[in-house]
Image: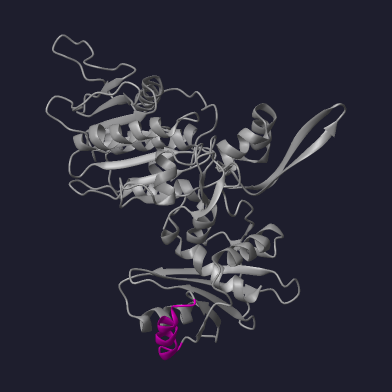
Amino acid sequence: MPTRAFSTPAYPIQIPIQRVKRSQLRDDTLHWRDWTTHHVPSYVRAGFSERHIQFWDWTWSIQHGVRPRPFIAIWPRGGGKSTTCELGTASILTRGMRRYALYVSGTQDQADRHVEAIGTILERLGEERSVNKYGSSRGWRRNRLRAASGFTIDAFGLDVGSRGTKDDDARPDLIVFDDIDGIHDSAVTTRKKIETLTQTILPTATDTAAIVGVQNLIIPNGIFGQMVDGSADYLADRIISGPYPALEQCVITPVANGEQIVYQVDGVPTWDGQNLEACQRIITTMGPDAFWRECQHRVHAGGLAIYPNITTIDPFDIPDTWQRYVGLDYGGVHTCAIILVQEPVTLRWIVVDEYLAGGVSIEEHAHAILQRCRSLEPFAVGGSKSEEQWRREFRKSGLAVNGPQFADVEVGIDRVSGALNDDTLVVMRHCTGLLNNLRTYRRAPDERGKPTKEIVNKATYHYADALRYIIGRVR
């Protein structure tokens, strides 16, 4: 499951360029926190959030000759996604982990600007330009950077494209996708971009290429949207970081100001570098609709999002005296469990833990779930009406599982939706698997864009189904 992590101030402080010894840049004993705070302090002064830590942990895990799983970050606008990616690219190359990077964006102009920004970072790091025998630069332009230490970065716009991208005899061993979805992309445009991605760009990569992508979800069925909802058959072993909104528990309230209406935002920032004041500036400038889309990933207009209202809370120690409740979703590949408690006074339901595992026996599943319940006897509900055999096997293994109250999926969805809408169901923030499921759970549109009964890629939503089983029985 995802982890989380960082970004830069909106306007990086201009500090004198510090020449750094290349041996320092390539010191593999340095932790990424030491590398960033020592070499690029002006870019990381706002610190690191959960999502940025996730990115930097992945970046520092890259090794020579080993293909890492692709890292796909769904982060908010203004949340440091591009700057983090630019810094990460510079760190991978200057540390000698890769030698040829392809930086891909929706347009060539976007890609050029990112590469230009990386050039500024490299100059701050004291990286020297590659020169020919006459002392002239061999390539330090908006769309290509060649360093004296032997690495190259090329900018690639999906609106231009070129087949068989190479640097002399080298093929890309680092590919970065940054803002490749456009707000006005049609289904045809997205299909063409996917074809370019899968038939032009990815085939040029080396077998051990590191691949990273960052984007906010500005359209529901774009390249990144399909990777989040599970419908993408490309980069199939991807790690999904997010979607992370700018604010948890976000509330936007219209307030009368004379003859004008202004919008006041409240919520819990997910990163110190994008606090409430920064979010308020975005809303004041762009309006609440743009904020919901660009910073909160609310892209499913027309009622396609099934659970648009989700309240999260900080984890806290649960008393052993509180009853545990478990929702189970069975599967031959994965079995999933959601663990809840109910506050005795408020009667509010709280999701406190989650479990997803495959390749183990039912007895092992039961043992692991009971351990998460602190070996207390939980009230468990799991599976559809027809999955009684699974329930029997779990009972034999020590976990008594009850059947659902009803067979209709829509009734269960309505009960979960009602509990989320009135805040009688909240989720602890560390339950990222469930939160990702709830945020991307949506209905397929008809030809007019209206929601249908069909749920997009329903078979992949194990956490959401497990929650539906237990809430449908106890609420």
User: Could you tell me if residue 109 is visible in this image?
Assistant: yes
What residue is at 52 percent from the left and 47 percent from the top? Answer: 244
The quarter in which the C terminus is drawn is bottom right
Main secondary-structure element of the magenta-colored stretch: helix
Residue 453 located left or right of residue 135: right
User: Could you tell me if residue 315 is visible in this image?
Assistant: no
The quarter in which the N terminus is drawn is bottom left
Give coordinates of residue 103: x percent, y percent. Answer: 32, 30
Give coordinates of residue 328: x percent, y percent. Answer: 48, 74
Of 33 and 328, the residue lying toward us: 328
Indicate the quadrant where residue 22 lies: top left
Indicate the quadrant where residue 159 lies: top left
Assess whether residue 395 is covered by the magenta stretch. yes
Q: Which residues are magenta?
A: 385-398
Of 100 and 341, the residue lying toward us: 341
Assess whether residue 450 is covered by the magenta stretch. no
Give coordinates of residue 407: x percent, y percent. Answer: 54, 72
Give coordinates of residue 345: x percent, y percent. Answer: 76, 75
What residue is at 52 percent from the left and 81 percent from the top? Answer: 403
Residue 424 located left or right of residue 158: right
What residue is at 38 percent from the left and 40 percent from the top? Answer: 213
Q: How many marks?
A: 0
* Residue 20 against residue 6 in the figure, above or below: above
